[in-house]
Amino acid sequence: MQIPGADTRVVELRVHGILGTTDHDLTDSVASVDVAGDGIGRIVRPADRLLRPVPGPMLSAGKRTVPRVVEGYAWGSMTSGGAKALWALLFPFAVVNMAHWMLPPVRSDDLVGRVVATATRALLRLVALLLTMLFVAQLTVLGLDVLAAQCLSSGSSCVGNVPGFFRELDVLRSIPAMAGVGLVVLLMHRLSAASWRVLASPTEGPNHSTREPSLPGNNVVTEPDTPGLRALHTVAALSTVVLLALGGPAAATNDPRWLGAAVLAGVCVVCVLLLDDPTGMRPHDSRGVRALLRPFPRRLMMSAAVVLLAATAVAPPNLDGSLPGSGSTVDTLTTCLAIGCALVGALVVAGARLTRSRWAHLPRELRPWAGGVVAAPVLLIGCLLGVGFGAGLALSLRRILATPQLRLPATYETVTLLWGTTTVLLVLASTVLVPWALIVHWRGAHSDEAVSPEVALLHAGRQQDQQRAAGAWQWAQLQHRYRNRLLGLLMAVLVAGVALALTLRLAGMPDWRWPGWLVGLGVGGLAALAATTLRTVQLSLRWPSTARRLGVLCDLSLFWPREAHPVVPPCYALKVVPELVDRAKEHLAEPDTRVVLVGHSQGSLLAAVAAARLMDTLDESARHRVGLVTAGSQLQWGYARAFPGVVPHDSQRDLSGTLEGRWRSLCRGTDPLGGAVSTWNRQVYDGQLLGVGFRSDGTEGPLPAAVRGPTGALVLGGDHWLPDPQRGPSGHRRWLPGVLGHSEYSGDPEWDRAVAMAAGLEIPVRGASLPLRTPTTTSQVLTNAERPEPAAPHAHTADSLGESAGAEVTTDPEHPDAAEVTAPEPHERPDAGEDQRPAEAIPPKTTEPRGNMPPWERGPALRPTTEC
């Protein structure tokens, strides 16, 4: 343990998770003020009654206290509030972009893997381009075809209060319709060009976004090809409007406007396929594409697309009836989109097979989800949402206008059939899974072993807390255990729904009665999707609470920079991480200051990436003054498995080794969203918690048995397992009753101890070893050398923990080298007829290590006395 000097202080830099939080809750104070930032990314501190920034409470470190400064980084305004609610309409694009980051990393020494990875990313970017073109085509169908050409045509009774001259002149109807679509494309272009201003020096490493990171998140960087990709999406979107209005992609007319739009669309497709080159395999080809997408050629292409759009709006085709290009354009784009998703899925499966050897040695609970192919179903979900939202808008508009004769593209019937089939399959799966989950939970809560060994160990001697924690623990573990299986089921339902819908459509079965019922169900589902989305956006613009809940989508999807799809809101990680690093360096400039980055939930990912950047850029002396605390984190069970190319297991192990034991993680077994970070394969044996995990020297393997701290928490490796409900109340600090789950980690007394350990001011000490069951027979005293060896920690995982042994171990504070072991005699068997009654439970006494006091009792002993 490093002995703090007289001027040592600790800066605790906190980062909140999703749904945002108030500044007061972030700093655990009654008032707070900004001390740095730009109003979007804000650094806040506790404040006094005059709103002056004040330091935080003293931090207990061993037997003394150290000054502490509490700061919080508030980033919630980057994803919610005001007009950001409209970003929900671009959620399908964000999901497609996120799918790119779920692909496995590229290894430079694997030629086949590099080829597969390059092809996968090229096709994924092409799918993103097709989705943009389809979205704009659907808007054009609404504005130009359904409204201008059909509803407002001469002789139509769709809208009765429209002047006659407006119905007679096509140009009066085409200009507003195409101008509206063009305005949407312009807004998409402006949004894709927006980014957050960073008040710090760049901290991005040399890694490309698709290469394997050495530390977590080192490849979360700005994509240099994003401006070119943005221009390609804009040009392709405008070209799609022109092609649809002039007869569709199969018209092949001699109209120069159609020829120009077709050439521009083809150039966009080819450039998207050749632009992505993460491994440097085609330096000459990429150089030519990037030369074509320099600022001047980009402006020239976009100007040509705008001119073609204006020429088509001024001289439109005949707008008396349904446009012939609507159906062919939407059908072609939808078919190409489906083929692209299928090809990407096949390549993702091939890539996962090639990289399987890298994680085959890991336990099952640490391997990537679905064998590393989770990017394929996520891409499919994004495409289904995009296609379904556009179809839902068109169907809802036709229902609002009460004009069933309005013609829509034939593909919409296939989309409705797809959504109806998927809805039926999801309902059928839910009718089986929901009762099954409730039955499993009920049986576990009413079984003879309702109190798991971990709960009994954490709450030893507190029967009431054991009963209250057992149900929440069992429900949370049920969610952790079957979350990946639920994802696999969703993947299977989506694939089955798509396959069944395509089979029904190609085989001509929609003429039967029951497929027609499926189409009706799909129409209702799509209309509900569009109406619910628009209503939620409307409420979010008026009510901050609804905006925060809708902001969860942005919190999860906008962490990832623009890579596959540029038309997504700006990435907040590219601003938060550099500013966290810059703030930490500012404090570390003082040689007696130690900085601890603390992240809760989603904030733990930001804090871990910032810590990795600090380890890459600081000198050796400053590195030893940096620590990391994560609370309720998803780094192990979520991000490492869903994003193996960004925060893989190996990179987290390397970060743990670089920090040399100064990465602490607060966990609760009752938390359904958070979990362990540095340990796995945990089991309780002989009254001790054992497991495998990261070691402070950068390796991984079996760990020493968990030690109980003065707050009642069990410390196994870098994980602090907190008793929930808390022990207490103590009367010396804030106490929170009840089962807390994923919330209020900072209110636990172990929080301060974890911060002190992350700052290098305290190390775990062995506390009381509480028995799991009441002694029932005579006991004998054995020395540590005679104590039986525990079973290997690999025997059982955290999902199927073994029973604890019959031996009971308690330590004597007066004789720390000996332990009292209570065990039943193996050869004594009671008579069959003898009435055996269990002994009355005697709560074990909690004993602390000699000379060690709980943190909340150290302050009064250290205060100076006023006596002479």
Image (spheres, rainbow, N blue to C red):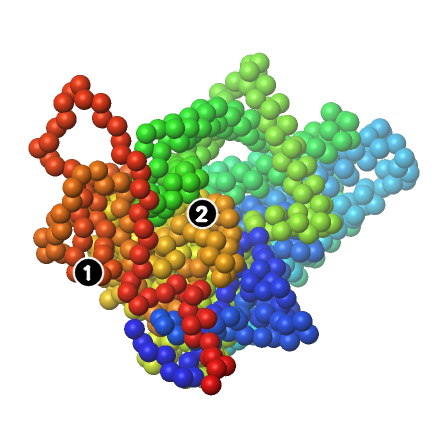
Q: Quadrant of the N terminus?
A: bottom left
C-beta proximity under 8 Å, tags 2 and 1: no
Residue situated furthest front in the rendering: 868
SS at badge 2: loop
Work out whether residue 49 can be spotted. yes
Q: Is residue 699 above or below residue 820?
A: below
Which one is in front, 273 or 31?
31
Q: Please give the label number shown on residue 725.
A: 2
Q: Is residue 750 above or below residue 592?
A: above
Q: Nearer the viewer, residue 161 or 616?
A: 616
Picture disc at residue 815: 1
Residue 214 horizontal/vertical position (percent): 33, 65
**Mark 2 belongs to which amino acid?**
Pro
The spot of residue 65 in percent (x, y) is 42, 74
Instruction: Please name the residue shown 32% across and 33% down the image.
Output: 449
Disc 1 residue crowd, few under 14, some 14–19, many 20+, Cα 10 Å = few
Q: Nearer the viewer, mark 2 or mark 1?
A: 1
Label 2 crowd (10 A; few <14 / some 14-19 / many >=20): many
Relative to residue 22, is residue 577 drawn left or right?
A: left
At 39% across and 63% down in the image, what residue appears? 854
